[in-house]
């Protein structure tokens, strides 16, 4: 079927000048792909890696180390483009620290090792056609680096990207280079052969190669590993590190039960439904650092024997032909991973190395830490921690994700991180010179971080506040700050009816065909259409041979001249291929039936699989579960569906003046109306909610309540106590505790508090402190809490849509603040919306709030709107 795809691909590869080994490997994977290979490693086919050698316990003399190193070459995987960090060229050309790029540091590390051990230690880069020129230009600074007879780089092979249908090479005339991709870093073994580098190294007496990623500065050529490998005659060594909670994603090694060989299971190789095993860091307690040592003689022997096809497991990657354009056509890329070669060599070993040998820079968060004073470069250009203790955790906002945005916001260097345990930045402040982070730091805002600021645990008596005094935030800035702290709620298998309104997290496939069997769509008689050929001219009598009701399975068959009574939904008996409706017969129950019309084959038969075929996706991820989705899920055999969990909201009112509704009011007291209002608003937004009544204006009571609820809830919403009064309990209790109290340029709802409470086990619980006036509270919920809940549930759009409405009477507004007024909106005869502002626009008017069905929005730069002008409105109730 896809023979043509293979032929065309091979032709293109030949035209491009790729060697026979590269083509053979391509053919090998192509066949696997065609055969439907998934490349997965099921959990029951492996056992966890047992006891392995720890590098720290290896005893090596200087002489042994030198001897091993003198036969070793360093090869760096250098094809990476750093697209994840917004780069377009070679990632290793990025400046890491002290004015040095990855490549500078790699070169200096190699030169230092050569000097220290008096060895030749060739350095070779495996480049892609995109990274070669730029990388070699950087290395020109080091005239002593090239070693005679060995090139400084070789270019890895390429293969055509394939169309998923028919597996033909994709055509992309816009940028034909995008029709090609590298076949993964597992191609290194093939490229070493096709480039001639393998022979060149062996000819020089180099027998071992240390292979690692160029973005991993911890991967230095450690002579102890080389010596250990030589001493024990190990053909292939993979370095692994202890796995911690944050390493759940990386690949791990395991022992294959069938032959006892060590295998690598990468993320892409996990069988469906087995993520939990993959993520279990107790069961698979080390991860693959992708630092690999290979005996080149053994490699050559193997490659010769196998004509270049090592047979590494295939990784089937689905991407877009233009990776930067998600709307470009989908393609298949057949890849393999360098580390999977471990299963190919008899006698391969894993060695446990310290974390310091795995220090990749994948994100600008990593970059910040490696650039900071938490690390330094020692005289051998190894990256060493300047401080004991764990590396700080860094989480920068999206504005910093690309290197360009990162550099712009740290124009005077990154902060000191020696005393920092975590740094989280929401918003996009520019950092001044000499900033120091201490302990856990959360920056939330859009202001400048001043020169010499100390962020975090500011010592008593420290003078200047760390951030410039806050201006007022805009509504959009505040909402952005809130949303940037939120991740979608975890997914959960949920019984159908409890999933109503939630978002499906994973494609759902039908477990059965729909219809499940050929059945009748009419009450009538199952017949062979041929038996009634003449019935249009003169009635035909058929002999009744049986009867089938819905839910029964007929045990007889219908032959020529025969009929079976059949009811709607009942399975078609064998032999019958059509149904004649009872109305077109004399309706006999037994004996003969007189049929007055002819029928075509298939008439009134609902064939099996007509609606849905078993295994097809019926409900794609992202679907909001509604009544019709539930019907489909149930029909396809599902009792549960995996959805993003419904967040639970605890609502707390504050104020000593509050008494529950229904109780008599004493002097100065009012009924707590915010609790029920916010509870309902949360439920309307799709969350589950719980009222905890009112706490008085006591900080201890509030803290005690929060300590309790934080353990069981996903979100906390309070009202009252956030402005400038003496009894502003929420603000007084929580300011400086990770909750920010800010002024937002809106009316009503200017004072707002938001932050993350920390629950048991470090769980983060979003906390909203809304103002107390009922209207302010309501508007604040609409504008900030509702979008946040929808973000958690992955419902889109997160914000209500603005619709234009014609104002029936004029309104005035404060300049400089966005005003959310209350209005009654209806449809005019022409179908357009008209808005009547309610009389009382004060933030204490509960009755006018209740009368309104919409908010109208007056922008910051508008102070007056006259009758007849169009205003944006947010409709609060669903339209019928
Ligand atoms: P506060 O922000 O606590 O000063 O409250 C502002 C105004 O809102 C005061 O008049 C409070 O009495 C009123 N208020 C606060 N909480 C509630 C509530 N739960 N129900 C009704 N009114 C409230
Ligand atoms: Mg109060």
Image (cartoon, helix red, strand yellow):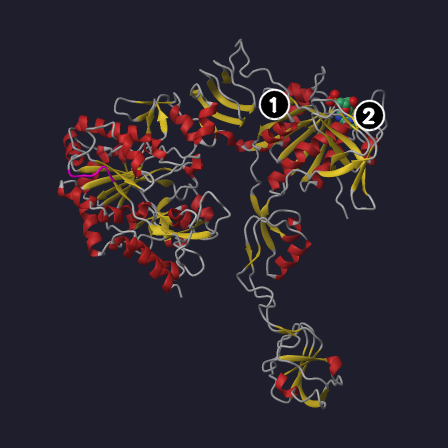
Q: Residue 745: within the magenta?
A: no
Whether ligand 1 has any atom under 8 Å from the Cβ at mark 2 is answered as yes
Contact (CB < 8 A) between labels 2 and 1? no
Image x and y of residue 315, in percent: 38, 51
Residue 56 in which image quadrant: top left
Q: Which residues are magenta?
A: 149-153
Quarter of the picture containing the N terminus is bottom left
Q: Nearer the viewer, residue 139 or 783?
A: 139
Q: Mark 2 or mark 1, which is nearer to you?
A: 1
Image x and y of residue 870, in percent: 76, 35
Horizontal arrangement in the rendering, residue 497 relative to residue 45 (left or right): right
Q: Residue 152: within the magenta?
A: yes
Q: Secondary structure at mark 1?
A: strand
Q: Secondary structure at mark 2?
A: strand
Q: Is residue 311 above or below residue 427?
A: below
Q: Which residue is mark 2?
A: 670
* Dot 2 crowding, Cα within 10 Å, few <14, some 14–19, many 20+: some
Camera sees residue 726: yes
Residue occupying the point 28% across, 25% down: 381
Q: Nearer the viewer, residue 501 or 835?
A: 835
Image x and y of residue 551, in percent: 65, 72
Which of pointers 2 and 1 lies earlier in the amino acid sequence?
2
**Residue 740 has which mark?**
1
Camera sees residue 693: no
């Amino acid at each position: 079927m896809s023979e043509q795809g293979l032929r065309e691909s091979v032709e293109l590869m030949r035209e491009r000048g790729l060697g026979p080994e590269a083509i053979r490997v391509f053919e090998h994977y192509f066949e696997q792909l065609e055969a439907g290979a998934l490349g997965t490693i099921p959990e029951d086919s492996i056992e966890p890696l047992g006891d392995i050698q720890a590098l720290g316990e290896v005893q090596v003399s200087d002489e042994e180390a030198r001897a091993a190193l003198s036969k070793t070459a360093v090869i760096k995987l250098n094809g990476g483009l750093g697209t994840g960090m917004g780069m377009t060229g070679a990632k290793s050309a990025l400046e890491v620290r002290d004015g040095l790029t990855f490549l500078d540091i790699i070169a200096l590390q190699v030169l230092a090792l050569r000097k220290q051990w008096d060895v030749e230690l060739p350095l070779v880069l495996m480049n892609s056609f995109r990274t070669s020129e730029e990388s070699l230009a950087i290395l020109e600074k080091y005239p002593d680096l090239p070693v005679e007879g060995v090139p400084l780089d070789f270019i890895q092979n390429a293969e055509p990207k394939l169309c998923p249908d028919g597996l033909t090479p994709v055509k992309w005339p816009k940028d034909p280079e995008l029709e090609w991709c590298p076949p993964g870093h597992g191609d290194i073994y093939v490229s070493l052969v096709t480039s001639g580098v393998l022979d060149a190294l062996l000819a020089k007496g180099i027998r071992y190669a240390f292979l690692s990623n160029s973005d991993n500065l911890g991967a230095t050529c450690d002579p102890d590993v080389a010596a250990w490998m030589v001493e024990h005659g190990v053909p292939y060594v993979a370095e692994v590190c202890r796995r911690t909670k944050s390493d759940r994603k990386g690949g791990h090694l395991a022992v294959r039960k069938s032959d006892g060989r060590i295998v690598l299971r990468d993320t892409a190789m996990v069988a469906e439904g087995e993520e939990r095993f993959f993520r279990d860091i107790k069961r698979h307690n080390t991860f693959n650092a992708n630092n690999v040592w290979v005996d080149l003689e053994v490699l050559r022997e193997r490659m010769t024997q196998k004509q270049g096809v090592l047979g590494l497991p295939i990784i089937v990657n689905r991407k877009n032909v233009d990776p930067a354009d998600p709307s470009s056509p989908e393609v298949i890329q057949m890849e393999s991973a360098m580390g999977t070669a471990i299963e190919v060599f008899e006698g391969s070993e894993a060695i446990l190395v310290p974390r310091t040998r795995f220090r990749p820079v994948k994100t600008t968060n990593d970059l910040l830490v490696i650039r900071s004073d938490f690390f330094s470069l020692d005289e051998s250009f190894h990256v060493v921690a300047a401080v004991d203790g764990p590396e700080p955790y860094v989480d920068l906002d999206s504005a910093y994700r690309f290197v360009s945005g990162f550099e712009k916001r740290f124009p005077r260097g990154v902060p000191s991180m020696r005393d920092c345990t975590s740094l989280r930045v929401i918003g996009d402040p520019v950092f001044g010179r000499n900033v120091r982070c201490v302990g856990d730091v959360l920056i939330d805002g859009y202001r400048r971080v001043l020169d010499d600021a100390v962020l975090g645990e500011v010592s008593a008596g420290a003078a200047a506040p760390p951030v410039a005094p806050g201006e007022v935030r805009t509504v959009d800035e505040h909402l952005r700050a809130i949303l940037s702290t939120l991740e979608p709620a975890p997914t959960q298998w949920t019984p159908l009816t409890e999933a109503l309104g939630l978002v499906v997290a994973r494609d759902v496939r039908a477990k059965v065909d729909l219809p499940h069997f050929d059945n009748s769509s009419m009450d009538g008689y199952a017949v062979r259409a041929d038996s009634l050929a003449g019935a249009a001219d003169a009635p035909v009598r058929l002999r009744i041979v049986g009867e089938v009701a819905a839910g029964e399975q007929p045990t007889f068959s219908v032959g020529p001249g025969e009929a079976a009574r059949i009811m709607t939904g009942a399975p078609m008996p064998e032999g019958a291929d059509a149904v004649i409706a009872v109305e077109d017969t004399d309706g006999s129950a037994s004996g003969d039936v007189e049929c007055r019309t002819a029928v075509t084959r298939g008439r009134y038969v609902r064939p099996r699989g007509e609606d849905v075929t078993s295994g097809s996706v019926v409900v794609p991820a992202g679907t909001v579960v509604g009544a019709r989705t539930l019907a489909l899920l149930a029909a396809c055999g599902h009792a549960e569906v995996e959805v993003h969990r419904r967040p639970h909201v605890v609502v707390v009112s504050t104020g000593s003046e509050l008494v529950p509704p229904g109780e008599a009011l004493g002097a100065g007291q009012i009924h707590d109306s915010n609790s029920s209002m916010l509870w309902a608003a949360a439920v309307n937004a799709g969350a589950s909610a719980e009222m905890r009544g009112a706490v008085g204006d006591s900080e201890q009571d509030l803290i005690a309540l929060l300590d309790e609820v934080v353990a069981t809830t996903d979100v906390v919403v309070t009202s009252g106590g956030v402005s400038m009064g003496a009894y502003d309990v929420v603000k007084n209790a929580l300011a400086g505790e990770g909750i920010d109290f800010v002024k937002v340029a809106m009316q009503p709802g200017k004072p707002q508090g938001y932050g993350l409470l920390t629950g048991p086990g470090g769980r983060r619980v979003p906390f909203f402190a809304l103002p107390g006036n009922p209207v302010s509270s309501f508007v604040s919920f609409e504008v900030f809490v509702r979008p946040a809940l929808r973000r958690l549930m992955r419902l889109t759009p997160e914000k209500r849509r603005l619709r234009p409405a014609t104002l029936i009477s004029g309104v005035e507004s404060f300049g400089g603040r966005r005003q959310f007024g209350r209005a009654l909106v209806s449809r005019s005869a022409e179908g357009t919306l008209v808005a009547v502002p309610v009389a009382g626009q004060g933030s204490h008017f509960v009755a006018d709030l209740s009368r309104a069905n919409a908010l109208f929005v007056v922008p910051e730069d508008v102070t007056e709107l006259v009758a007849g002008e169009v205003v944006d409105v947010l409709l609060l109730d669903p339209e019928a």
